[in-house]
């Protein structure tokens, strides 16, 4: 399924993709946009659970 992403969303995905690639020691091309979204979602859930 294709989803339209505006410029700001693409920049966020690229920034997080770079960070994840460094953390995992892999090339950015191995980090998909879907992986980035799932990572951001899991991070936000952790923050919400820890703040409760």
Image (tube, helix red, strand yellow):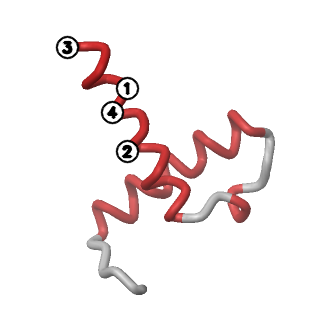
Measured as percent of width and height from the top left, residue 24 is found at 74, 38
Q: How far apart are marks 1 and 4 (CA)?
A: 4 Å
Disc 1 packing (10 Å; few <14; some 14–19; many ≥20): few
Residue 46: numbered disc: 1
Q: In this view, does 48 lie to the left or right of 39?
A: left
Labels 1 and 4 touching (C-beta < 8 A): yes
Q: Quadrant of residue 3?
A: bottom left
In this rendered view, identify the residue nearer to me: 3 or 21. Answer: 3
Q: Is mark 1 on a helix, strand or loop?
A: helix
First of labels 3, 4 by sequence position: 4
Q: How far apart are marks 2 and 4 (CA)?
A: 6 Å
Measured as percent of width and height from the top left, residue 42 is found at 42, 38
Q: Given the current orientation, which residue lies at the most extreme bottom position? A: 1
Above or below residue 12? Residue 43 is above
Q: What element carries label 3?
A: loop
Labels 2 and 4 touching (C-beta < 8 A): yes
Q: Which residue is drawn at 68% across and 45% down?
A: 21
Point out the image quarter for the N terminus: bottom left
How many labels were placed on the picture?
Answer: 4
Q: Nearer the viewer, mark 3 or mark 2?
A: 3
For disc 3, the marked residue is: 52
Residue 41: numbered disc: 2
Q: Residue at x 30, y 81 (%)?
A: 4
Residue 45: numbered disc: 4
Q: What element carries label 4?
A: helix
Above or below residue 1? Residue 31 is above
Labels 1 and 3 touching (C-beta < 8 A): no
First of labels 1, 3 by sequence position: 1
Q: Distance between the residues labelled 3 and 2?
A: 17 Å
Residue 33: numbered disc: none
Q: In this view, does 4 lie to the left or right of 23?
A: left
Measured as percent of width and height from the top left, residue 52 is found at 19, 13
């Amino acid at each position: 399924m294709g989803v339209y992403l505006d410029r700001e969303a693409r920049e966020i995905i690229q920034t997080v993709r770079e960070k994840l690639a460094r953390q995992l020691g892999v090339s950015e091309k191995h980090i998909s946009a879907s992986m980035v979204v799932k990572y951001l979602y899991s991070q936000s859930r952790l923050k919400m659970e820890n703040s409760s």
